[in-house]
Amino acid sequence: MKKWNLILFFSLFSVVSFGQQENTLLWKIEGKGLKKPSYLFGTMHILCADDAELGKNLRAAIAQSDNVYLEVDMSNLMEMADAMSKMKMKGDTTLETLLTKVEFQKIKDYFENENTLLPFAMINTYKPLLAASLLEQKAMPCEKTAMMEQLIMQEAKKNDKKIKGLETMSYQASVLDSIPYKLQAQQLFEYIAKSDKKDESDKQMKEMIEVYKKQDLNALGKMMIEEDAGMSAFMDILLYNRNRNWVNKLNTLLPEKSLVIAVGAGHLPGENGVINLLKKEGYTVTPVQNQYSNNLDTNISADAIKPI
């Protein structure tokens, strides 16, 4: 389930490298008659707190933007509440009905021992890949974690920028209905069964974090194209179709306002990644320096946000 670990960390839920040489997570969108540039940034949904920070160019871009778009509007509590009902499997399906007694018991014991925030009675009814996402924080090699999206939201609010979503949480949860629940349950079981090999898991996690910290989309692409038996048929549903939907939406948004668009870094690279899809639509998408610094002149002009 290595590939699904990557998708859960770099996307909300492979990608193919296409020759990007620049190591950056921040990209400038221009051309096609746009009056003002917009910016695209790749997030990792959970990081160790010490590694989670925003580069000065990203912070400057947020300060100058009209709106900040995340995958979903995480500030919308009503939307979050509505999405809860979409997290459950349809009908009376539960993990217990999808797995053998031995498999189910192992998963049950694991979640109860990990003391997750939700009671296992609820997890038993959740779509298994969503249940797997609850284990992300436990897999991190640190006690204190942070969400990149939360930092971006804080920066947006500090600058009085509206936060919006490219899609809804309900839609994200409903997408998983397209993957057989039994297959999801088997993936969850395999993930937990391999958790006993802690050294191997820790090594993979550290590799993921290092790739992200280096802002190396090429390396990220190579890590994510590793095949996972039975799951590759669903990449269009989980990743590529969402990328296409976002770019279609951005076609209507970009001419109107200057945006900062922050989505999972796994959505950026590849032939069907957001960067390449924007280029196919006629936009000029160029890499921007993304060094980290606490010193920011919020009056910095858009022209001074340096390209690579």
Image (spheres, grey):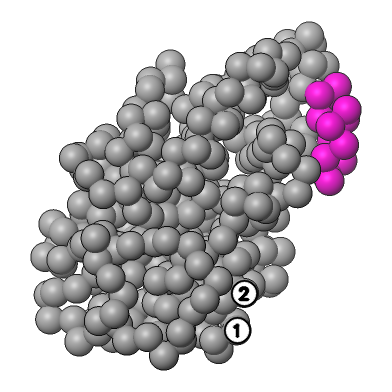
How would you rate the neighbour count of disc 2 (Cα within 10 Å): few for under 14, some for 14-19, many for 20 or more? few
In the picture, which quadrant includes the N terminus? Answer: top right
How would you rate the neighbour count of disc 1 (Cα within 10 Å): few for under 14, some for 14-19, many for 20 or more? few
**Displayed quadrant of residue 149:** bottom right
Q: Would you place residue 65 above or below residue 234 in this image?
A: below
Q: Would you place residue 77 above or below residue 53 in this image?
A: below
**Residue 88's spot in the image, x, y percent?**
68, 44
Residue lying at 16% horizontally and 59% vertically, measured from the top left: 279
Q: 52 or 265: nearer the eye?
A: 52
Three-letter code for the amino acid on which mark 1 is drawn: Lys
Q: Is the magenta stretch mostly helix, strand or loop?
A: helix
**Residue 132's spot in the image, x, y percent?**
65, 34
Give the residues drawn in magenta, as a range: 108-121
- Whether residue 306 is visible here, answered yes or no, is yes
Q: 270 or 52: nearer the eye?
A: 52
Give the residue at mark 2.
Answer: 154
Give the residue at mark 1.
Answer: 158
Circle 2: element type:
helix
**In the rendered view, does 89 fall on the left or right side of 263?**
right
**Residue 260's spot in the image, x, y percent?**
40, 72
Q: 304 or 269: nearer the eye?
A: 304
Three-letter code for the amino acid on which mark 2 is drawn: Gln
Residue lying at 68% horizontally and 37% vertically, measured from the top left: 140
State the separation of the CA atoms marked 2 and 1. Answer: 6 Å
**Residue 29's spot in the image, x, y percent?**
24, 69
**In the rendered view, does 271 fall on the left or right side of 109?**
left
Q: Do the residues labelled 2 and 1 touch (CB within 8 Å)?
A: yes
